[in-house]
Amino acid sequence: MKKNETVLVAMSGGVDSAVALLKIIEMGYKAIGVTMKLWEYNNVGGNVLKENNCCAIESINNAKLVCERLGVPHYTIDFTEDFENKVINNFVDEYLSGRTPNPCVRCNSYVKWDTFINQADKLGAKYIATGHYANIEKNNNEYKITRGKDKGKDQSYVLWGIPKETLSRTILPLGNLRKREVRQIAADNKFENAQAPESMEICFIPDNNYKRFINEYAKDKVEEISKKGTTLNENGEKIGENDGFINYTVGQRKGIGITNPNPLYVKEISSDKNSITVSEKKSLFSKECKVSNINWLNNKITLPLNAYAQIRYNGQISESKISDNDGSIFVTFEKPQLAVTPGQSIVFYDEKESLLGGGIIELHES
Amino acid sequence: MIKTNNLYFDTAATTPLDLRVAEHMHEINKDIFGNPSSIHQVGQKSHNIIERSRKKIAELLHCKQSEIYFTSGGSESNNIALRGVLKSGDHLITASYEHPAILDVAEYLESIDVEVTYVKPNQDGIVESQNIKKAIKSNTKLVSIMAVNNEIGTINPINQISDMCKEHNIYFHTDAVQYVGKREINLNSSSIDMLSLGAHKFYGPKGIGAIYIKSGVSVNPFIFGGGQEKGIRPGTESPSLISGLCHALEIAMEDLEKNSIHVNDMENLFLELLDKTKIKYNVNGKSRLRGIINITFFDFDGHSLLLNLDMRNIAISFGSACASGTAKASPVLLSIGLNEDIANKTVRISIGKHIAENDIHSLVDALEGIIIK
């Protein structure tokens, strides 16, 4: 890599991206800090004055202070329209069709590694860098993503959807650091955000209450479907009523409201019928699932393929076989998996923990 | 002038402090601290600095001393004018491309049942007197039209409009923050009833401005307190800020002709040099105050142009800025009939008295480097 080339560093205002910026400077690059403004608090609800998360003015201001401290320019660039079209609308639609989306994955695939890369072109920057805990390794002109050194923080799971050709332009400076090391570096360098709290699960839902968010954001659509729903057993028989399917996620145990000798879990959600199917835990395991929107990050993939699949962020991996059945991709798990949730990401690794690709989980067979 | 490493082409946003003003204020800050309302001599010193400033400013603007009220700046002056005169049931006529310090006040006034008509500028960026006349109703109480538009620099016929308003017995206010210090003004002989100005647009300090209120115009305050500024704008006054405003205006009016010739020359040079490049551009608006150049570069996105220039330490402006530092296509440009695509390729380059010929050369070289490559 040639030094003195420009790197656009994505700055959320948090501690990770601040340290990522420092590392980029230490590597000898010319850095520009950029905060992507993804949404307006005014549009998504929550408390405007109390919160201190990314895209809040305070976070953007912290990013600016860190950039000034390190002597690099900082710009805030408005991506709200893109983020709304590509991430928030999809998030709402997915929930309204009874699925459990993963907005961070979509943001990476369609905003950070698309709009943000385009911004790098406009500013004459060859590379982009982010504070994700994952690595990019180069081997014989092939780039691959591997897990971050800090296993508890590894974020390779949310990177499966980024376009393969952008890997050569991406630097992930935190891949070989642990979170506590990052915090220490931030404190040693007196970064203004060294003590900033961990960011939330979903950045545009500051109070973490996604039901409140959907109710406010998609009021018209929700009114039709917020009626009482039916609760079914595995045989399709009505065994009770519920607050409407929108309030449930596959694998959820709380709020089912039916007494049973063993605890009951949500097994399936039907938005069409406004019903949830509940069962005991043992019925929640699946041997197989269908996968859509598949993205491969490796040139040499041929199906069928044996790989390690991970069906949730920070989840366990399981040996599995990926096969192509008339154009549909199916994954068969060596060991049946609990609560394989439609809408969530399924991510594949090889035996060396390098990321092969991933896709979106579709309805699975029992 | 305050020293900066950057080539600063954003004087319509704010100007650097004239060093003579900075030194003048520093002297006052060192010696004068009394509360202007205090009876003792320490207080009297502060009081007299303020009143001497008021007298001088009145002379420079050709009005009475009693007609000048000090405020925190242009926004506050605009608030005083609109909120001080209008009550529910009244009708306000303003322009659709005013600064937010007028438009947001108008929006608030609508919420308390003031009727508002937003007159559109023509495609040259000028608000025509006849269009205002057409909007007048029986309950029209106030017309507020900016003297110079802050984004495109077009000069409105405020004397003509204010005369017409006088004939109809309607108050006329003008937001003149981009005008004062750049053109002669004679308030005595005009029909302008109220005028807002801010010191930081003519090399004075930020945080101080004034409103001219013609004798006889009745204005109700919306800030209450110790009765300073005849109750129109209570709060302990700052002698150094007020005197800084006065000194900056004195310098501006004294150098008016010199500065305006210089800025004119610099703008001509800029456009001449641009014509020698392959850059495709258009300057928007007619009948402009020279030095505020609203310019479309057809082959480059305006926001990216700003960032690319900034990385070369050259400061210009794009769109309407938000608190977070982002910017969107300017509503002003949309209001003069530019489409969103063109508006997104349009930036504002404003030239002040501190700009020298070689600065213009550097700017055009940088533009060529970025746009043509």
Image: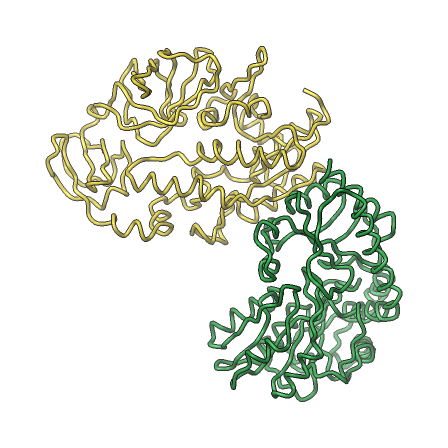
Quarter-wise, where is residue A63 in the image? Answer: top right
Image x and y of residue B255, in percent: 88, 67
Exactly how many numbered labels are in the figure? 0
Query: Chain B rendered in what hue?
Result: green
Quarter-wise, where is residue B245 in the image? Answer: bottom right
Residue B1 left/right relative to B223: right
Image x and y of residue A229, in percent: 19, 44
Image x and y of residue B309, in percent: 73, 43
Q: Is residue A16 above or below residue B208?
A: above
- The residue lying at 74 percent from left, 83 percent from top is B190
Residue A18 left/right relative to B372: left
Q: Is residue A352 visible?
A: yes
- The residue lying at 73 percent from left, 27 percent from top is A4
- The residue lying at 53 percent from left, 45 percent from top is A55
- The residue lying at 65 percent from left, 83 percent from top is B164
Question: Viewer-proximal residue, B50 or B283?
Answer: B283
Q: Quadrant of the C terminus of chain A?
A: top left
Query: Chain A rendered in what hue?
Result: yellow
Q: Is residue A323 above or below residue B251?
A: above
Residue A89 left/right relative to A113: left
Image x and y of residue A348, in percent: 41, 19
Q: Is residue B42 visible?
A: no
Q: Quadrant of the N terminus of chain A?
A: top right
Q: How is the image coloured?
A: by chain
